[in-house]
Amino acid sequence: MSDNTRRDFLKNLLATAGAAAGCAVLGGAGAKPATGQADAVVRPPGAVPESEFLARCIRCLRCVEACPNQAIVPLDASAGRARASTPSIRARRQACMLCNKQQGDWLKCTEVCPSGALQKVRREPDEVLARVTMGTAVLDTSLCYSYNGWTCGACYRACPFPEKAMKIGLWERPVVVAEACVGCGLCVRTCIRYPQAIRIAPREEDRCRV
């Protein structure tokens, strides 16, 4: 890489990092979903399938209070009457850290849910991999720096299950392993590209294997 190219890349890197930080601030609890994404709701870990979740959830928001990373936020009225005040995760705002380095045996949100809308999940890597299916990371290679002349690898380094849920190739090109991705969104939160090159597509079926 030439000096000029490297200089341009670093300048762009700083700009996109600043934009991403601004996006994280603007994408707070009161922010509305992006256009066309109103139905793309990512539920907290342990959530049962959507139709059952809506029937079970009593909107107590204990999961919101219990989340150590403040990743869970209630949906507002723009989500529709059926979904308003139900818990969701907007990874660009704040990702689920799967209660990493927390005390206790269970994922905190699943432990406090009184209705069974969130099924209890042990805070153990094997159980998280087997039972948490919040969604799947989807990579846009047309936006990803590592597929467009530079290297990055930020999403891979953020993944809690490297080489299982995400692999990395030449020039730090990430490859999502959909079958192992739990949808925590840490890759989305750390993506330095703006608009980000990776997002979480929620899984509507088999949200929690029990």
Image (cartoon, rainbow, N blue to C red):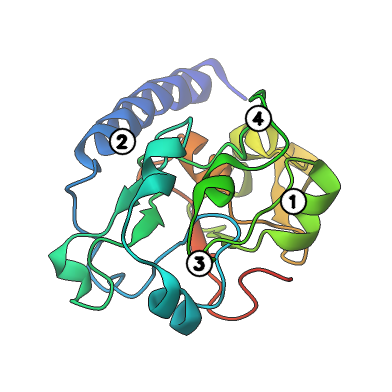
Q: Which tag, 1 or 2, sits closer to the chain's start?
A: 2
Label 1 belongs to which residue? Answer: 128
| Label placed on residue 117 | 3
- Front residue of 144/118: it is 118
Residue at x-position 80% and y-position 60%: 130
Label 4 belongs to which residue? Answer: 100
Q: Are marks 1 and 3 in contact (CB under 8 Å)?
A: no
Q: Position of residue 109 (x, y in %)?
A: 52, 46
Q: Nearer the viewer, mark 1 or mark 2?
A: 1
Q: Are marks 2 and 4 in contact (CB under 8 Å)?
A: no
Residue at x-position 42% and y-position 40%: 71
- Mark 1–mark 2 distance (CA, rounded to whole Å): 26 Å
- SS under mark 4: loop
Q: Which tag, 3 or 2, sits closer to the chain's start?
A: 2
Locate the N terminus and report the quarter of the image it occupies: top right
Q: Nearer the viewer, mark 3 or mark 2?
A: 3
Q: Position of residue 14 (x, y in %)?
A: 38, 21
- Mark 4–mark 3 distance (CA, rounded to whole Å): 22 Å
Label 2 belongs to which residue? Answer: 24
Badge 2 crowding class, 10 Å Cα cut-off, few under 14, some 14 to 19, many 20 or more, is: some
- Front residue of 2/177: it is 177
* Residue type of the residue flagged with mark 2: Ala
